[in-house]
């Protein structure tokens, strides 16, 4: 995969890349608070993709974590 730096429309570019995934999405970031990107992850999980999200357990993510609990998908 080629690495490209993006300085404009970053959220849209990340969403485009997440939507293009076909098997698995792995996200590891300190803070994940973007509702639109989280919705993309949930949709992809609903389509059957394996989605893994690792975030720092702190007060910034706790409020967002309540939304994540609501959208939890399991694939065995």
Image (spheres, grey):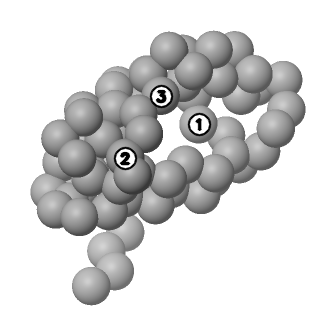
Mark 3 or 2: in front is: 2
Residue 48 in view (yes/no):
yes
Residue 16: horizontal and vertical position, in percent? 18, 49
Tag 3: Cα neighbours inside 10 Å, few (<14), some, or many (≥20)?
A: few
Dot 2: element? loop
Q: CA distance from mark 3 to mark 1?
A: 15 Å
Mark 3, residue position = 72
Asked whether the beta carbons under mark 3 and mark 1 sit within 8 Å of each other, the answer is: no
**Sequence-wise first label, 2 or 1:** 1
Mark 1, residue position = 32
Give the number of marks: 3
**Which numbered circle lies on residue 45?**
none
**Sequence-wise first label, 3 or 1:** 1
Asked whether the beta carbons under mark 3 and mark 2 sit within 8 Å of each other, the answer is: no
Dot 1: element? loop
In the image shown, does 9 or 25 lie closer to the viewer? 25
Mark 2, residue position = 75
Q: Residue at x 26, y 52 (%)?
A: 49
Residue 74: horizontal and vertical position, in percent? 42, 39
Q: CA distance from mark 2 to mark 1?
A: 22 Å
Tag 2: Cα neighbours inside 10 Å, few (<14), some, or many (≥20)?
A: few
The N terminus is located in which quarter? Answer: bottom left
Q: Residue at x 71, y 28 (%)?
A: 61
Q: CA distance from mark 3 to mark 2?
A: 10 Å
Dot 3: element? loop
Residue farthest toward the bottom in the current orientation of the protein: 1
Above or below for 4 versus 60: below
Q: Residue at x 84, y 23 (%)?
A: 59
Dividing the picture into quadrants, the one containing residue 64 is top right
Dividing the picture into quadrants, the one containing residue 41 is top left
Residue 13: horizontal and vertical position, in percent? 25, 50
Residue 66: horizontal and vertical position, in percent? 63, 14
């Amino acid at each position: 995969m080629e690495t490209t730096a993006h300085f404009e429309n970053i959220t849209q570019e990340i969403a485009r890349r997440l939507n293009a995934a076909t098997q698995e999405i792995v996200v590891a970031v300190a803070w994940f608070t973007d509702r639109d990107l989280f919705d993309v992850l949930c949709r992809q999980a609903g389509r059957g993709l394996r989605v893994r999200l690792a975030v720092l357990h702190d007060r910034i993510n706790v409020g967002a974590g309540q939304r994540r609990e609501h959208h939890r998908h399991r694939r065995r």
